[in-house]
Amino acid sequence: MKKVLQDLSYEELCALVLSAGEKPFRAKQLAEGIAQGKKLSEIPVSASLRARLLGEFEDEPVKIRETFVSRDGTKKFLFELADGNLVEGVFMQYSYGNTQCVSTQVGCRMGCKFCASTLGGRLRDLTAGEILGQILAVNRLEGGKKGERAVTNIVLMGSGEPFDNYGNVVKFLRNLTAKEGLNMSARNISLSTCGLVPEMRKFAEEGIPLNLTVSLHATTDAERARTMPIANRYQIADILAACAYYFERTGRRYIFEYSLIEGENADEEHALALAKLLKGRPCHVNLIRLNAVKERDLKGTDERTAQAFLKTLLSCGISATLRRSMGSDIGGACGQLRASYIAEKE
C-alpha cells in the first residue's frame, strides 16, 4: 500500500514540492485539489510532479463503494480503502447544516455491548488522510466547493474509538481546521470517546476546542461495566475529573451520551441518579433510545419512557435533549456502523 497524500499538512506539502525541485505554488495547487476531493491524478500540476507523486502516493485512498438512502433522507456510505478494508459513514441533513459521521478505525477494540463497530475487533487504525478522505469524498459528491462546503459539521462517532488512534486523529483535526484545507471551525466538530482518561487530559492541551462527548450510559461503575469494559479501567469519577480539566483548559462545556436501554438504565431512579451526578457541572446530556444491533440482545426503550427520563432531568435543572434517531432503517443510526459490509453476509 502506498502512502496517503491527504495525511500531509500544508507545511509538509510545501516541503514535498520543494524536495521535488518544483516551485512553491505547486503546494497550493495540491492543497486546493485535496480540499476539492480530487484524485491525485486529477489535480492540475506538472506532469513530472504528478508522475512522481503517483509513484509514491495512492491516487484515491478513500472511495465511495456504495450509498444507501434512508426513508428520512439520511445517507450511509460504504467507503473502500486502498488495502480493500471497508468502513462506514453517515451524512445527515439538519436545518442548521449537514453533519457527517466519520470512522477513525477499521473496527474497534473497546467491546461496548451495544455497538456493532466492535463485533469483529479492531483490524487497524485509519491514517489522518483516510479519516479526512471520507469527508472529502462526501463533500465532493454533495456538491461542496471552495468557500461553500456541503459538509458543515463533523462528528467522530463512526467505527472506532478516536482516542485509541490518538496521533492520527489529532493530525486529522489539525488538517481539517487548517485555513489551507477545508478550514472547518473546531466548534463544528464533535469527538466521542468511551472515556480514555489519559488521552482526554492530553487532548485538553492540544488547543483544539471541539465538542468533547463522552459515552456514559450509566450512573455507577458497576452498572457501566456491564455494557462497557472500559469501566474496569477508568471510573466515572476519573472521567468527570478529566471533563472538568477539559472545560478548564478550553472553556467548552462537555457532553454526555446516555443510551436508554430497556430494563437497564432508563427508569426514574436512574434519571434522578444521573441528575445528582451531573448537577452543577457545565455539561449537556444527549439521550439516545438504543438502536437495534441484530447480534445483541439489548433493546431500546419506548418513546414514552424516553420522554419521561428527559422530563426528570430537565426538572432537576440538567441541560438535556432526546436525540432523534436517523438512518436506522439502513443501519446508519448511532451504534449501528460496522467495519464490514453486512449486506454481503445476509
Image: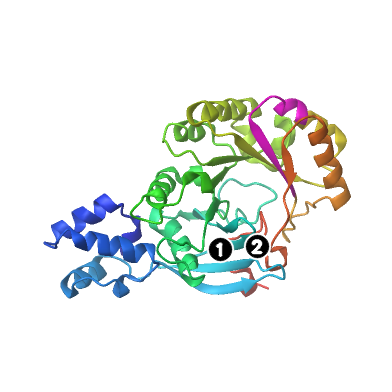
Instruction: Tell me the kind of residue under disc 1.
Output: Glu
Q: Residue 280 vs residue 108: left or right?
A: right
Instruction: Tell me the kind of residue under disc 2.
Output: Gly
Q: Residues within 10 Å of mark 1 (few under 14, many from 20)?
A: many
Q: Which residues are magenta?
A: 275-288
Residue 341 x %, y %: 59, 69
Q: Are marks 1 and 2 in contact (CB under 8 Å)?
A: yes
Q: Residue at x 42, y 44 (%)?
A: 170
Residue 30 x %, y %: 28, 63
Label located before the other in sequence (1 or 2)? 1
Question: Observer-nearest residue: 98 or 161?
Answer: 98
Disc sitting over residue 88 in the figure: 1
Q: Residues within 10 Å of mark 2 (few under 14, many from 20)?
A: many
In this view of the protein, can residue 1 be seen by the observer? no
Which corner quadrant holds the C terminus? bottom right
Distance CA(mark 1)–CA(mark 2):
8 Å
Q: Residue at x 79, y 35 (%)?
A: 314
Q: Secondary structure at mark 1?
A: strand
